[in-house]
Amino acid sequence: MKYNFDKVINRKNTDCYKWDTTKDGVIPMWVADMDFEVAKPIVDSIIKRAKHPVFGYTMVPNEYFEAEINWWKKRFNYEIKKEHIIPTSGVIPSLSAIIQTFCQKDDKILIQSPVYHYFNIVIENNDCKVITNNLIYKDAKYEINFVNFEEKLKNDRPKLFILSNPHNPVGKVFSKDELQKLGELCSKYGVLVISDEIHRDLVFKSFNFTPFASINKDFEQNSITCTSASKTFNIASLKASNIVVANKKLRTILDKTLSKNEMKGVNVFGIYSLISAYEECEDWLFELLIYLEKNKNFLEDFIAKNIPNLKVVKAEATYLLWIDISSLNMDSKTFTKKLEEIGNIRVISGATFGENGDNFIRVNIATPLEILKEALLSIKKTIESF
């Protein structure tokens, strides 16, 4: 391979949220970023811009929009237009602005639990109410409860449905048929779909990602998509993301909220990192996905052979694995606390992602295989000590 993902990089004392908020001697496998070097063209693009000694106000250049448009076309066979793209600093600020734009106080917003916990946080921070359509866990994978989904739309009348696709934390890539059913129901009940597609590039072989808005013109006009290169290329701190809105009326209203709160625009280094990532680093992503799948397969095999009382949910995407700990007869918060205290491994409690996540933990495998092996041995020893 051209890129060395086995290289261990010391991230301690670099103001790294993942490592520097974790006790010395503890392996952090919680925050969703990767322990791999960023692709060299991205680093080079940042250095090149940094050599210019003035960092005044910056416009988002045409090259930025062209890189985003071409990536959608090349990777997902979906054409978006420059005027559909609104650059922002991050997906969560974007979600906040969307809620502020299209909801009033105490309005309801539908999510599918267990799900990325910041969905709950951003909804409640904007004085709205969370309603949940719990995903069905069956045979180590998840399915949508469409009957319950329609009941929630019909009876609770949410203003928005926030979709996580690919899904964090369960690693599900929703099929085109599933998205079709979700979209038709939302259109039927007049609910706007907000599709968080930040993990769209991190899909394992044999699975295909479908952008929600690409399915048909109705869905395109009844949706807003949030995405970023940050998860794919490990550049979250550079603060660059995009909201894609084909519906001109929705886009105009949302743009007003973003402008009012000064939420538009991208960090100058985020601009050039995105251009470089999408134009020069597809080969890096290709090798990354091979490495992540190798790590995933190693973890699944290790647990099956050495920790059979755990069960790994079948991951179709993301580097975040969802592991069933129900046979331990211990809630996830207690288990994660013991795992950190006894085994020196820090993961996230499944309860963080909703009540129906309490029998699970989320583990980040985007780390060199050497570290993953050490972590798995520690998990095994910790469970054996109970």
Image (cartoon, rainbow, N blue to C red):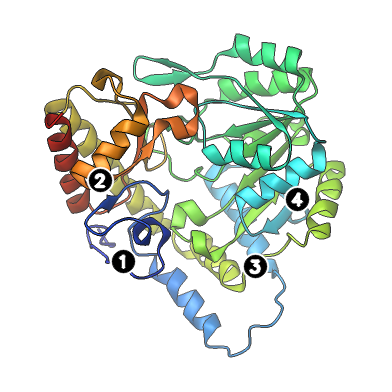
Quarter-wise, where is residue 357 in the image? Answer: top left
Judge whether 19 appears above or below 365 on screen: below
Identify the mark nearer the N-term, 1 or 2.
Answer: 1
Residue 138 image point, x, y percent: 39, 14
In contact (CB < 8 Å): disc 4 and disc 2: no
Query: Which residue is at a point 16% across and 48% down the rendered structure image?
Result: 374
Numbered disc 3: secondary structure: helix
Q: Amino acid at mark 1?
A: Lys
- Residue that carries the numbered disc 1 in the rendered image: 12
- Residue that carries the numbered disc 2 in the rendered image: 345
In contact (CB < 8 Å): disc 3 and disc 4: no
Identify the mark nearer the N-term, 3 or 2.
Answer: 3
In contact (CB < 8 Å): disc 3 and disc 2: no
- Residue that carries the numbered disc 3 in the rendered image: 63
**What label sits on residue 279 in the rendered view?**
none
Measured in 3D between alpha carbons, the distance from the residue under mark 4 to the one under mark 2, in whole angstroms, is 43 Å
Residue 268 image point, x, y percent: 61, 73
In contact (CB < 8 Å): disc 1 and disc 3: no
- Residue that carries the numbered disc 4 in the rendered image: 84
